[in-house]
Image (spheres, rainbow, N blue to C red):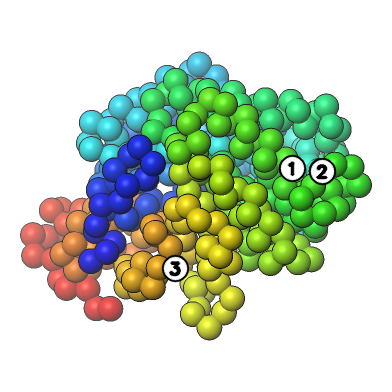
């Protein structure tokens, strides 16, 4: 199976082509990684590459309860426990650097959320007091943008000190970078708005800041051209994301990571315009594809050359020994949606492995 073949990713050799997708799990009270998170990531260290859950690069980058940060010394020390344990178990792990922009709420930091433009997203914000209407974001000035870029720089530094193998810049799912990229959230008329080139400027500034800390072959970028998450949309996603892919091509990055479909929607449909194929046309480095894949559809994507690596989200939540199950063709555990974002160990570190659920795995039905 191609999925189980090793893969050379820049300076790193991955033991297989199965990537654990970034997954927010809200298990970091106070924003600091803890022993429960160490256990969770270590259980999944047989993934070719783990990409952590989104980690906010500063207080205003937070939009959900108990998500971990990557800007204080305590957070660095907490992450160091995670990276040491994953490395000890033979795995590789990148930190996902995240700023939610307008998807934040003053509940988390007492301030007005920030965004490229003062446009309220559709939907409601998650807070521990329940769902609240989104607030009108403050449109960042050029000087404030420089400060946010500096936060990404700091996040990259903390990730380096914490012993990660690399970082992924979260440019997807309607968060701050995506808000700059897509016309539905960006109505700026300065050098950060209007044309695809100018809307991509913020992303490129972040890439530049992060690659001043890390060799570019240890930096990935995640995008979601199909849009939709957190009220994001673009007038011409093909034009926008072709431009993004062209701009990132030639930076010598570790990879581009492309999401095909939002959670809960159908996975990639071979008849549709495929976001991964769109990026692949203009980007010549490693491509990771994600969104609704099963081991079978993932294998087909690798066979066809649609992507080089495949990321799985919910299946890695439910199957700590996912790689081993695929190797044996064993049955997979079902993900338990109600515990995705719930606090505590249940639904987090207590999914059974095959050795717990029985020594004779039943063959999986494709
Ligand atoms: C519980 C949960 C949390 C997620 N958190 C993140 C995140 O922090 N960063 C991110 O880029 N995507 C996040 N995603 C999206 C996943 O990385 C992935 O793209 C999506 O789940 C589709 O893949 P799947 O069908 O294999 O689950 C999340 C998805 C789920 C289900």
Disc sitting over residue 201 in the figure? 1
Residue that appears at 50% across and 36% down: 216
Observer able to see residue 333:
yes
Lower sequence index among marks 3 and 2: 2
- For the residues labelled 2 and 1, say whether their Cβ atoms are less than 8 Å apart: yes
CA gap, disc 3 and disc 2: 31 Å
Secondary structure beneath dot 3 equals loop
Secondary structure beneath dot 1 equals helix
Provide the residue designation for mark 2: 192
Image spot of residue 337 (x, y percent): 45, 59
Disc sitting over residue 15 in the figure? none
Observer able to see residue 134:
no
Image spot of residue 319 (x, y percent): 29, 56
Residue that appears at 85% across and 41% down: 191
Residue 50 image-quadrant placement = top left
Provide the residue designation for mark 3: 306
Image spot of residue 203 (x, y percent): 67, 42
Q: Is residue 169 above or below residue 335?
A: above
Q: What is the residue that sits farthest to the bottom in this orientation?
A: 271
Lower sequence index among marks 1 and 3: 1
Which of the image's four quarters has the N terminus? bottom left
Residue 226 image-quadrant placement = bottom right
Q: What is the residue that sits farthest to the front in this orientation?
A: 250
Q: Residues within 10 Å of mark 3 (few under 14, many from 20)?
A: many
Q: Is residue 249 above or below residue 31?
A: below
């Amino acid at each position: 199976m191609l999925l189980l073949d090793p893969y050379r990713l820049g300076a790193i050799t991955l033991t297989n082509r199965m990537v654990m997708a970034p997954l927010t799990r809200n298990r970091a009270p106070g924003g600091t990684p803890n022993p429960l998170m160490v256990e969770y990531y270590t259980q999944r260290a047989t993934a070719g590459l783990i990409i952590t859950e989104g980690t906010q690069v500063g207080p205003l980058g937070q939009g959900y309860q108990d998500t971990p940060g990557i800007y204080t010394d305590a957070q660095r020390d907490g992450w160091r426990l995670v990276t040491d344990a994953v490395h000890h178990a033979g795995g590789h792990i990148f930190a996902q650097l995240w700023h939610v922009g307008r998807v934040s709420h003053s509940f988390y930091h007492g301030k007005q959320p920030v965004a490229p433009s003062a446009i309220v997203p559709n939907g409601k914000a998650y807070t521990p007091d329940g769902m609240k209407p989104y607030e009108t974001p403050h449109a960042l000035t050029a000087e404030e943008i420089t400060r946010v870029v500096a936060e990404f720089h700091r996040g990259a530094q903390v990730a380096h000190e914490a012993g990660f193998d690399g970082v992924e810049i979260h440019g997807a799912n309607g968060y701050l970078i995506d808000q700059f990229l897509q016309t539905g959230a960006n109505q700026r008329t300065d050098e950060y708005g209007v044309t695809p080139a100018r809307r991509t400027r913020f992303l490129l500034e972040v890439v530049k800041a992060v690659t001043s800390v890390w060799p570019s072959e240890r930096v990935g970028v995640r995008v979601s051209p199909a849009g939709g998450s957190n009220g994001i949309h673009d007038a011409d996603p093909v034009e926008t994301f072709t431009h993004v892919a062209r701009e990132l091509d030639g930076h010598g990055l570790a990879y581009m990571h492309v999401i095909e479909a939002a959670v809960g929607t159908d996975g990639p449909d071979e008849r549709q315009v495929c976001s991964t194929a769109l990026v692949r046309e203009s980007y010549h480095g490693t491509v990771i594809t994600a969104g609704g894949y099963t081991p079978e559809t993932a294998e087909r994507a690798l066979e066809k050359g649609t992507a080089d690596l495949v990321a799985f989200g919910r299946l890695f939540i439910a199957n700590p020994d996912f790689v081993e199950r695929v190797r044996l063709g064993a049955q997979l555990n079902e993900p338990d949606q109600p515990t995705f974002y719930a606090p505590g160990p249940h639904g987090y570190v207590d999914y059974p492995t095959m050795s717990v659920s029985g020594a004779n795995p039943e063959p999986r039905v494709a």
